[in-house]
Image (cartoon, coloured by chain):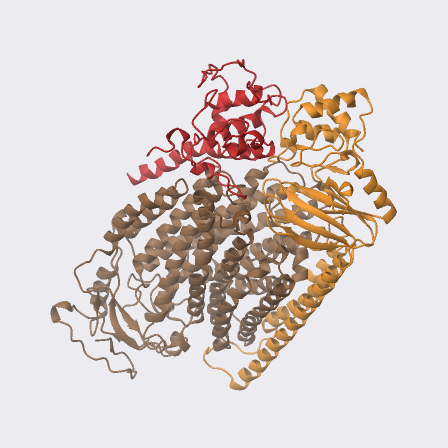
Chain colours: A orange, B brown, C red
Amino acid sequence: MTFALCVLLLQGCAGWQSALDPKGPAAGELAWLIWFFTALCAVVWVLVMIALVAPLVMRSRPGDEPLLLDEAAERRKMRVVAFAVGLTAIILIGLTLLSFFANRTLAAIGSEAALTIRVTGHQWWWEVRYEDATPSRILTTANEIHIPAGEPVRLLLTSTDVIHSFWIPSLAGKLDLIPGHMNVLDIKADKPGVYRGQCAEFCGAQHANMGTFIIAEPRPKFDAWLNDQLQPAGAPASGEAKAGADLFLKRPCVMCHRIGGTPAGGTVAPDLTHIASRKTLAAGTLTMSRGNLAAWIADPQGIKPGSHMPVADLNGDELNAIVAYLEGLK
Amino acid sequence: MSSADVTGDRHIPEPDPAKGDLAPERDGPRDTGMDDASLHRWLERTWRTPSGIVGALSSVDHKVIARRYLITAFVFLGLGGLNAVAMRIQLSGPQRGLIGPDLYNQLFTMHGVTMMFLFAVPIVQATGIYLVPLMVGTRNIAFPRLNAFGYWIYVSGGAFAWVSFALNMAPDVGWFAYVPLSGPEFAPGKRADVWAQMITYTEVSSLAVAVATIVTVFKQRAPGMSLDKIPLYVWAMLVTSFVVVFAMPAVMITSTFLILDRLVGTHIFNPAEGGDALLFQHLFWFFGHPEVYIIFLPATGMVSAIIPVFARRLTFGHLGLVLSLIAVGFLSFGLWVHHMFATGLPKLGASFFTASSMLIAIPNGVQIFCWLATLWDGRPVIRTPLLFVFGFFFIFVIGGLTGVMLASVPLDLQVHDTYFVVAHFHYVLIGGSVFPLLGAAYFWFPKITGRMMSERLGRCHFWLAFIGFNAAFFPMHLVGLWGMPRRVYTYPAELGWGNINLFISAGALLFFLSFVLFTFNLVHGALKGTLAGNNPWDAGTLEWATSSPPPSYNFARIPLVTHIEPLWAEREALPVATGLRVDARELLISTVAEAYPDIREKSATPSIWPLFAALAVGGTFLYSIFTPWAIVWGAAPIAITLIGWFWPKGDPEDQE
Amino acid sequence: MRQALAMLLPVTLALVACQREERDTRPQSALGSGEQPTPVTTLEPGGQRPSPTDNKAASFEANAFHMSEGKRLFSWFNCSGCHANGGGGMGPALMDEKWLYGSSIESIHATIRDGRPNGMPSFGQKIPDDQIWELAAYVRALGGNAPSSAAPQRNDGMMVHPSENRLPDAATLGKSP
């Protein structure tokens, strides 16, 4: 009954961030493994429950003298128990081998990765750096990771503050970002798409709002995106945006954020060079829109209490100008 | 040299007790040949807890201490449950604004800390403190003052944590408190210090109980209770105590390292100066995984005690069960790394821990199969305790099987730190430990209070708890697979976790209500329950041989054990051993393996000093989170109280 | 007696804890707080700051969370560029007992906000007022002027000086306590 219910529920679970809706070879292997283990465990559980309920249903003898035991029956039972233990051992050995070989399959996925991306965890956002032999081709962005679809990509994971864990359920299992360590995670998305993930290791006040996206695109589109992102920020288009650009440099924003092509060079907060080209704000907390941008700047502590984005003392005009500027940073 | 005379209905050949060569003035009246009424008067005068508030505070009676432990742990269960309810209300819908992250993080930390350190471990140990001396047929637990000290330490530790919570300075770093998040840089204030010191000193109490239990089991068993006749529950407590002795120091070292880093500025966990953040996790889980078995093994003992009584037959595979307990105890130390698969350990090493984690399923499987084989005979008598044991099977087997899933490295990488794991360990801990504990509560309540709990309410309680539990925790498996991580104070609406979380919250509320009903049943049973008599369930172990509730001296004469289920084997009257003094607290010490009566040993008299010592230690620990100098200043009162505690009394400590 | 003590303990704790443990990240008024007349040219050592009007000082001065945030900002905003982790370089040392413009949190706040002659820039526009208070509280801790039970602890990094909660009070440095 429970099992049937569970199967029913699991079938309707295609989701943005679901381990059961794999979109890459690693997650596919893992989803298969999850299903196999679940099915096997369900069978074992049902057998145990049958063994538990059976004596209640079929009555054999009333319990009168607790010390009187039927020797032959005891021996029979001993054989059954020994058989069950043996069977358990065989199943467990099988599962161990299965998970060992699955682990090998996972390890083989990224063996010829052409693209290396360094992901650094911060409280509570992700710094994403596309490594390249040419320094001018190194790209730093935040929270959203564009990758070419169908190609393995190598992620180097580390952290500058506390331990985080990088997890995109529909592409691969999670791996921790640990200060002082460098972990390597290879991922591959079979098809273009947007895959959500979030930090999986408790990392403080805003652990819940530390989302990230992997955006898989066909290779040409990815290359175009990369070239766009490597450009410095565009000049402000309108007068208001121009005022915003000035304010950005005069007011608190400049202390932490970087905008390529301007004197703003902070590295402790997300790079805003092309912020308007991203889908979300504040590590997946808000969707990108003018209203959300204004709300986030005006009251970050109301939206992500405890985050390191301070409440800047801006008046309405200043806020509008800065929003107009940032909105133009495609 | 003198030992107990062996008299009774039947004469069992024992090694001849060399008759005493003690000076007569050192010897008092013995129970040999004394009539029942005067024996009761003597023993009651010798063993009773003194009256008055000072008397109550100086009690060293294991039953009194255990009752306090049980009630205190139950209160902490209620508080931890309220934490859970608050969290479930916050999570009942996406983007709820009821509780902010600062409070939520304290709530889930307090929930974990309370349930693990202030409820689960103390309550299983408290049950042991009550039952082990009764089951092995002795008059008090070993080291009774240490036992009393342990209780005071535990209460003050728990109070410390909860007062901190009330003051908005409860730890907010999770019950595991990983560095660097709990370390000096990222956890300002005293919150993480509260965690560290509270862990260290509540574990002192746990260690005290473990040592007392081990010695009680090894040296104070009734004559004739050789190793093969020790009840399974006592075996379980023995193995648990050994696991405590080896596991708790690991967490005490972890928390002490943490507080050294925080207060004294050491660099044990600082990678830049040669420390390592992962070291914390290794140390913590070297304790943390055995911790699960510290909670679970006593529960298996309870199941092993309940099943034969209601199945009306001897336990099937007694030896197999004992060996499984010991095997689980050993293996539990070899699989801590499966909590750390996502930290990027070398792959081959991780695979080794997959194998070792799978391995522990085998002895646990043996236990399950032996219990099932015991139940298989005849139609079991279905009463509330057995119902909870059935609930245990239903729930724990699921938890065990999801545990097998978590043992697999690649699979764990998907479900680690998600609600799947939350579901898994609640299935294991609530199914594996709380359900047997509830069964045990119904089972031994008549022994403790002399009255029965209501069977009708008990059944209602069972079904409410069973349905509430499964409604609350089964869907968590799903929401975890759908990608919901643990320890989040909110989640976005777009991910579609809203409805299922609402359902979970409703189940959690139902589960909480079942405990309200249980509390009512407890109080009602204690006040108005029908009188139980000595042995209401017609059980076979020694604790049912004495009256309900047991007198302060437990047994008027120390029973002589001839069978694994003595009360079933000796239906008429239990053979007894005599020869103990009745005017002084004397215990019969027996040999470890065969339980031959060996020597008579004094048992400590009531004393207020353990309380003072606990206050001094507690004060020192509390003060030490503010300045390391507390260790220096605190040493003086601790020394004074310990001197008071161990001040020579002028009478021979040991009478051989 | 025992009960009285038992009552007293939490009360005392509460009084001690409420200042130290609070974590307020969202200032009451987001706009234009902390405007007070600030003489930019008070040059005398230990400059008298006749404006103890801002009640924010108290809520930042001994608060562990704010001081720790101040420590983070001290490094994020590169105060070390001139003050070198408190030891001093192009700018004056912050760990000694000399305070050119007074050691009160209000003075330090004013220094950061409005700047000082000979190089200290004004950050009033660039750093939100609450963060200036956090920095000021931290700078006081650098000189050993904060309660050691609330002062920041060591960082997970190379150690450049003993952690702030273990720094001696600069005024008594070198003298026996």
Q: Position of residue B358 (x, y in %)?
A: 60, 68
As drawn, C131 above or below B302: above
Residue B391 image position (x, y, % from top left) = 56, 62
- In the rendered image, residue A152, in percent from the top left (x then y), is placed at 78, 55
Residue beneath the point at 35% across and 43% down: B630
Compared across the picture, whether B1 is left or right of B258 comes to left
Residue B587 seen in this snapshot? yes
Which of these two is toward me, A218 or B222? A218
Image quadrant for the N terminus of chain A? bottom right
Residue at the extreme bottom: A72
Q: Residue C119: horizontal and vertical position, in percent? A: 57, 22
Q: Which residue appears at 38% of the width and 61% of the height?
A: B129
Say how many tags the image has: 0
Q: Is residue A174 visible?
A: no
Horizontal relation, residue C66 to residue A253: left or right: left
Q: Which of the image's four quarters has the C terminus of chain A?
A: top right
> Residue most toward the front?
C90
